[in-house]
Image (cartoon, rainbow, N blue to C red):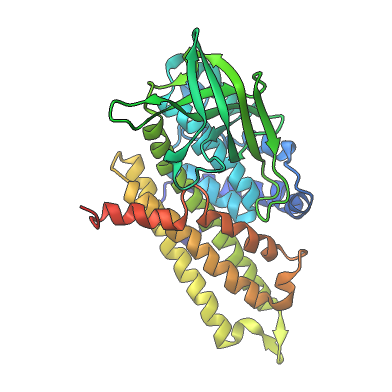
Amino acid sequence: MHDYDFGLSEEHRLLRQNIREFAEKEIAPYAQDLDENETFSLDIVKKMAAMGLFGIVVSEEYGGPHMDYLAYCIAVEEISRVDGSHGATVAAANSLGIGPIYYFGNEKQKKEWLPRLCKGEILASFGLTEPEAGSDAGASKTNGKLDKGQWVINGSKIFITNSTSEMAGVCTVQCVTGTKPDGKKEVSCILVPNGTKGFTAKKMHKKMMWRASDTGELYFDDCRVPEENLLGKRGEGFHQMLSTLDNGRLAIAAMGLGGAQGAYELALKYSKERRQFGQPISTFQVNSFKLADMATEIEAARNLLYKACMMKDAGIPFGKQAAMAKLYCSEVMGRVVDEAVQLHGGYGLMKEYNIERFYRDYKLLTIGEGTSEIQRIVISRQIGCYS
């Protein structure tokens, strides 16, 4: 039992042990090559599906194990401790892919999509970000218009995870579907199956980070889907997006926590093996203090994230804590990987050392699903800075 399993159920501890063993056996030996070659491994994704990593929180009637959000975040944490790309695949598949359908879909939509998503037969994506609409999600230009019982969608999306591989099955697309009485945009979410005529998904290459994950540009050119593909009610898309991002922030925080843990362990191991001036460099006070600070910040990050997960699982409003956890865990990973590379010295800059990959992978965590700046806006609103 790890000291950070204190207070967790036997189910959570066993889950951590199983996912850790899986990640070290099935992902760690291949992570470097997959990263170097920008390869999205269908084999590993299917093995993760067989481990039950997709649809963790989904109820049994739709094919999931119906575990809690804390269990989900522990799973993402353990995958990310070994590799950020595969942590991203799991996080996006659950929070952004399965989440909107599970929480906002009608019975027909849930039964059509969730069992296949939980089995890992297909992956779902969430089409939110556009070339001109990032932090300002309300600036979306992709539009959907009703015509003879069909939504006709035009526009584009960018930086969409799990959207282009042969496993990509459906995308929840945020569209402008009209104008509200107050003049503001009416925003709705519409399910668009991959392969639909007029829907093109293009894989993005030359990423600095998460090079073994699947990131795509999506194009909609008079793409037609049935009117019944509307997710929830017309005009609820903005609320659905905000709720999806609240949940997703917990998973991004878990990626930061897991990545920080993995980088810290690499730094500790290296510093105990690397000898200078006749002794391990871990014994030099300047280095031992770096490692002590890493361990302390990781402990604080874990407590913050686990509390936020427990609040969600208890049905308590958790938006502020989700933003805090996402902000803190992602920035803690940044501080940890920076010092971990420093401890490795010149070797930390070489691709044969895993810490180089961790250093690159952390950066997206302060940008994706709401930048650190946006998290601070969310938090400042929650604590009453704006009347």
Residue 59 in sight here: no
Q: Position of residue 215 (x, y in %)?
A: 65, 41
Q: Is residue 236 left or right of residue 74?
A: left
Task: Judge by depth and name the residue closer to the eye, 1 or 138.
Answer: 138
Task: Judge by depth and name the residue closer to the eye, 156 or 279.
Answer: 156
Q: Is residue 323 left or right of residue 344?
A: left
Q: Position of residue 49 (x, y in %)?
A: 63, 34
Residue reaching furthest to the front: 183
- At 46% from the left edge and 43% from the top edge, which residue is drawn? 248
Residue 178 in sight here: yes
Q: Position of residue 284 (x, y in %)?
A: 59, 87
- At 64% from the left edge and 67% from the top edge, which residue is drawn? 266
Task: Judge by depth and name the residue closer to the eye, 30 or 173.
Answer: 173
Q: Is residue 71 left or right of residue 154?
A: left
Q: Quadrant of residue 36?
A: bottom right
Q: Position of residue 136 (x, y in %)?
A: 44, 45
Q: How many marks do you count on the picture?
A: 0
Q: Quadrant of residue 316?
A: top left
Residue reaching furthest to the left: 387
Q: Is residue 275 above or below residue 253?
A: below
- At 62% from the left edge and 24% from the top edge, which residue is drawn? 221
- At 49% from the left edge and 8% from the top edge, which residue is drawn? 149
Residue reaching furthest to the bottom: 277
